[in-house]
Image: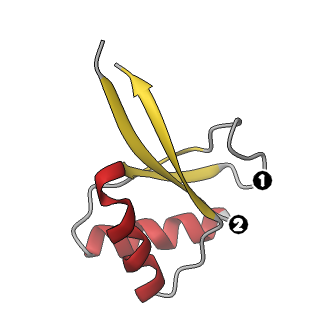
């Protein structure tokens, strides 16, 4: 079974998650909006997933676009 590492970005609101998705897609990142994993948060129900290898660049792009986010977590999925 292969393991895949993802970065999951948490937000304070769904509006923030959508704004982040737009900004990151424009910047050329492969991202996807997902339901927030309950083990990470019960606040906003929408999170953003990207490759863990892109986590630092995604963080910099979000800060550059002035998109507010709560935190970034590493999640490993057995596929």
Picture residue at 30% right of the left edge, 11% below the top: 1
Picture residue at 37% right of the left edge, 78% below the top: 61
Q: Give the image location of residue 58, x and y in percent.
A: 37, 68
Residue 73 vs residue 13: left or right? left
Q: Give the image location of residue 47, x and y in percent.
A: 56, 52
Q: Sequence-wise, which precedes: disc 1 or disc 2? A: 2
Q: Quadrant of residue 26?
A: bottom left
Of the pair 78 and 48, the residue shown nearer to us? 78
Dot 1 falls on a residue whose secondary structure is loop
Please tell me whether residue 14 is drawn above or below residue 37 in the rendered image.
below
Please tell me whether residue 24 is drawn above or below residue 6 in the rendered image.
below
Indicate which disc residue 62 carries.
Answer: none
Instruction: State the residue position of label 1.
Output: 43
Image quarter of the C terminus: top left
Q: Give the image location of residue 21, x and y in percent.
A: 42, 65
Picture residue at 71% right of the left edge, 55% below the top: 44
Of the pair 68 and 56, the residue shown nearer to us? 56
Residue 41 vs residue 23: left or right? right
Residue 20 vs residue 1: left or right? right
Determine the CA span between mark 1 and mark 2: 7 Å
Q: Residue furthest right?
A: 42
Any part of residue 66 in sight: yes
Within 10 Å of the Cα at label 1, are there few (<14), some (14-19), or many (20+) other Cα atoms? Answer: few
Within 10 Å of the Cα at label 2, are there few (<14), some (14-19), or many (20+) other Cα atoms? Answer: some
Instruction: State the residue position of label 2.
Output: 12
Of the pair 38 and 60, the residue shown nearer to us? 60
Picture residue at 78% right of the left edge, 46% below the top: 42
- Answer whether labels 1 and 2 touch (C-beta < 8 Å): yes
Any part of residue 51 in sight: no
């Amino acid at each position: 079974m292969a393991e895949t590492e993802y970065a999951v970005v948490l937000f304070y609101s769904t509006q923030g998650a959508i704004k982040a998705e737009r900004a990151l897609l424009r910047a050329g990142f492969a991202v996807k909006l997902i339901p927030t994993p309950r083990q990470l948060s019960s606040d906003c129900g929408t999170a953003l997933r990207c490759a863990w290898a892109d986590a630092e660049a995604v963080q910099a792009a979000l800060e550059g676009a002035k998109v507010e986010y709560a935190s970034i977590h590493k999640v490993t999925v057995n596929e």
